[in-house]
Image: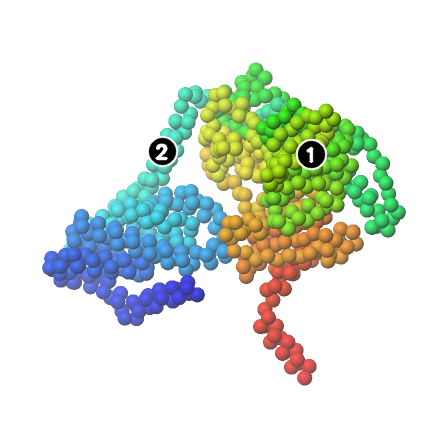
């Protein structure tokens, strides 16, 4: 209501301006005819005249009324060039800031909420280079300043940045107009101000910052590359270091567009995903799930079943799955696709030269895709006692009797449930107040309850302090609310996160800037501090998922190969992921806790999967579809799905968000009955029901009553 009131006042003031024909007083011919009187009044009352002029200019520019150009000429005629330019500059800047603020206060929230997805790239550009763009626009007086003021008000630009940039950016225009205004008596019309010669000069003036910016980039690159000798020609168009998900995709894209590309991998092709991550973990999860389902035989109308298994054979199956998938990522396959594959450890000698196996390779561009490795905390006694990570746990052939999982993130949760279902006595130690802290609290509770049914002991708010070896066992000592807790174990699995460990690839000869977490400092094009060196995958962050690595690889390789013509900003707007526990937890976009933390207005629509026919028939009647939308709109901000095959079900929402489809479109889509996918439609129906037009329906009810007679 306050915004509506302000808008009404602004409209009323503008209406009064035109109804009372006040714009007549800002007409060029009128100002010119009264020039002598205005000048005489100034000589009689200089301060009063300057103040009145300032206030008039402020109102005209603040309300975006026509006449600012004529007022600028009048300043030159009355005050002369130095004083006139100063008064106009200050008044124009203050007035522009008022218009900027009014546009922001009245319209920005509406525009951003309605068109936020389409404006995401614009918002990022304004946040990064908004002052530069505004300064350039201010240098060209032929652009309507009032439009610039109003449009900038709709962006994230800070008011202080707008004011300061406008102040300096309008100096040239103010001087030009005020200087011409000193000759107001001899000026025939406003059209006489912007002559072709002057327009060309202003255009050059506007282009100058862009030229200067490019020059700064070249100087910066020159400084970065100082001390290195750039080869006159290159052996290759692209060298990719690391053959995980990101590196494989980057190399494949380069080969597809007929570039000469070399892929270097020091360990195994396929990286963590194939050898120690996604593939083996999902194979183990499937075996553990089968055993868990067998224990539920009575729920399916069968007699109780006791599954006999050999843990060694289960691990053999895991390795067999890896071997089956392995050809997809093999050097043989990629060689046939046009990629030169080299087994060996790469080292950057300079920004264009890579040494591997005693051979020196040169390339115009390089993509770093060296991944990350498990983070191992500096825990006293841990190394001496022995431990496993997600890299080494696949080497065991004996099922641990007592197992500690250190960490409550996705990796720790998936493996905790797996080993508990296989028969280990699993204790999960989490320093935070709950497992899966990135998910909404009630989502984490659903998973924790499932874990408890599977026999996992979850110890939250337990901080690991030390590992000690006692005569009959090894013990993890934790602190919990000031008390000491001792947990005996046979095997401890550390799953507290991942870290970048590949600095040795470049740190001997290059000074690539890195963040506190060790990841390279990258721009929006995935360039490192050396513009021809890019990064993708776990090394780059911020998401350490296989599919994100592949997503980044497209941007890294395309920018590396064709960046001189056009570079593409990496897009993280729709990134899905899934934790493959039972129930699965899949998510895309915002969840409720993140929306609240970021202050994003939202509504929540939920559908309880326990009511879904197919879930009931499958004895999987548990979980939820939780959708966040823009208030009053069907535009999707984010979705969390908990339940059977949640990782598959989320795809419909990923596609909807990517292609700007709202819940009404999902509700209007036919879903096969009976399937789990119907849950997506029912969630859209829950949103629709919450937004039913009750007043209209009441009139429809009366209509039907009338029709009955």
Q: On the rendered structure, is 326 left or right of 557?
A: right
Please tell me whether mark 1 or mark 2 is closer to you in this view.
Answer: 1
Picture residue at 59% right of the left edge, 24% below the top: 264
Picture residue at 60% right of the left edge, 41% below the top: 481
238 in relation to 48, above or below: above
Q: On the rendered structure, is 363 left or right of 37?
A: right
Q: On the rendered structure, is 539 left or right of 144?
A: right
Q: On the rendered structure, is 430 left or right of 20?
A: right
50 in relation to 407, above or below: below
Residue 648 shows in this picture: no
- Mark 1 and mark 2: Cα distance apart in space: 62 Å
Q: Mark 2 points at which residue?
A: 215
Q: What is the x, y in percent for residue 413? A: 67, 40
Q: In which quarter of the image is the C terminus?
A: bottom right
Q: Residues within 10 Å of mark 2 (few under 14, many from 20)?
A: few
Q: Name the residue under label 1.
A: 487
Taking the view exactly as shown, the residue that stands out farthest to the bottom is: 709
Q: What is the x, y in percent for residue 199? A: 28, 47
12 in relation to 463, above or below: below
Q: Is mark 1 on a helix, strand or loop?
A: strand
Q: Do the residues labelled 1 and 2 touch (CB within 8 Å)?
A: no
Q: What is the x, y in percent for residue 467? A: 65, 28
């Amino acid at each position: 209501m306050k915004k509506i009131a302000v808008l009404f006042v602004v409209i009323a003031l503008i209406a009064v301006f035109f109804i009372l024909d006040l714009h007549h007083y800002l007409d060029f011919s009128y100002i010119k005819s009264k020039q002598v009187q205005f000048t005489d009044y100034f000589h009689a009352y200089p301060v009063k005249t300057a103040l009145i002029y300032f206030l008039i200019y402020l109102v005209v520019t603040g309300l975006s009324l026509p006449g600012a150009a004529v007022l600028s000429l009048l300043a030159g005629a009355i005050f002369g060039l130095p004083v006139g330019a100063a008064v106009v500059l200050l008044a124009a800047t203050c007035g522009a800031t008022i218009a900027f603020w009014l546009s922001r206060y009245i319209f920005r929230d509406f525009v951003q909420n309605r068109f936020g997805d389409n404006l995401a790239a614009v918002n990022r550009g304004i946040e990064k280079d908004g002052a530069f763009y505004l300064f350039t626009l201010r240098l060209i007086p032929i652009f309507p300043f009032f439009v610039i003021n109003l449009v900038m008000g709709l962006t994230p630009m800070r008011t202080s940045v707008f004011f300061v940039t406008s102040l300096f950016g309008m100096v040239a225009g103010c001087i030009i107009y005020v200087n011409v205004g000193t000759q107001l008596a001899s000026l025939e019309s406003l059209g006489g101000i912007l002559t072709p010669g002057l327009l060309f000069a202003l255009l050059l003036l506007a282009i100058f910052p862009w030229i200067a910016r490019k020059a700064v980039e070249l100087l910066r690159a020159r400084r970065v590359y100082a001390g290195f000798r750039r080869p006159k020609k290159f052996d290759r168009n692209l060298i990719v270091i690391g053959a995980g998900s990101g590196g494989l995709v980057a190399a494949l894209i380069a080969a597809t567009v007929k570039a000469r590309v070399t892929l270097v991998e020091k360990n195994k092709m396929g990286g963590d995903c194939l050898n120690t991550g996604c593939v083996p973990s999902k194979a183990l999860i499937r075996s553990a799930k089968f055993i868990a389902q067998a224990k539920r035989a009575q729920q399916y109308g069968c007699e109780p079943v006791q599954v006999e298994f050999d843990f060694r054979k289960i691990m053999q199956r895991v390795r067999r799955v890896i071997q089956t998938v392995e050809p997809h990522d093999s050097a043989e396959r990629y060689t046939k696709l046009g990629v030169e594959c080299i087994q060996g450890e790469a080292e950057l000698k300079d920004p264009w030269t890579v040494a591997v196996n005693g051979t020196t390779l040169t390339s115009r561009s390089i993509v770093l895709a060296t991944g990350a490795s498990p983070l191992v905390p500096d825990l006293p006694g841990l190394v001496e006692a022995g431990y496993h990570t997600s890299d080494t746990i696949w080497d065991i052939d004996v099922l641990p009797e007592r197992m500690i999982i250190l960490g409550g993130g996705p990796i720790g949760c998936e493996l905790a449930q797996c080993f508990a279902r296989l028969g280990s006595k699993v204790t999960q130690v989490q320093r935070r107040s709950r497992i899966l802290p990135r998910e909404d609290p009630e989502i984490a509770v659903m998973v924790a309850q499932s874990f408890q049914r599977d026999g996992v002991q979850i110890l939250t708010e337990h901080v690991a302090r030390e590992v000690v070896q006692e005569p009959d066992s090894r013990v993890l000592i934790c602190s919990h609310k000031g008390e000491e807790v001792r947990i005996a174990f046979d095997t401890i699995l550390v799953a507290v996160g991942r870290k970048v460990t590949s600095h040795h690839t470049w740190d001997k000869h290059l000074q690539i800037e890195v963040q506190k977490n060790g990841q390279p400092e990258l721009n929006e094009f995935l360039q490192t501090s050396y513009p021809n060196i890019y990064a993708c995958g776990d090394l780059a962050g911020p998401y350490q998922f296989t599919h994100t690595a592949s997503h980044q690889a497209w941007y890294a390789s395309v920018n590396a190969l064709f960046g001189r013509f056009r570079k593409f900003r990496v897009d993280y707007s729709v990134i899905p992921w899934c934790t493959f526990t039972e129930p699965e937890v899949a998510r895309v976009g915002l969840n409720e806790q993140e929306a609240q933390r970021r202050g994003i207005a939202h509504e929540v629509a939920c559908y309880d999967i326990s009511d879904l026919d197919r879930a009931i028939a499958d004895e999987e009647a548990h979980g939820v579809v939780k959708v966040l939308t823009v208030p009053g709109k069907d535009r999707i901000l984010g979705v969390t799905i908990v339940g059977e095959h949640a990782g598959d079900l989320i795809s419909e929402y990923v596609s909807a968000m990517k292609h700007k489809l709202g819940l009404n479109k999902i509700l209007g889509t036919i879903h096969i009955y009976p399937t789990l996918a119907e849950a997506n439609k029912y969630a859209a129906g829950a949103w629709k029901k919450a937004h039913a037009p009750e007043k209209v329906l009441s009139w429809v009810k009366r209509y039907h009553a009338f029709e009955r007679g």
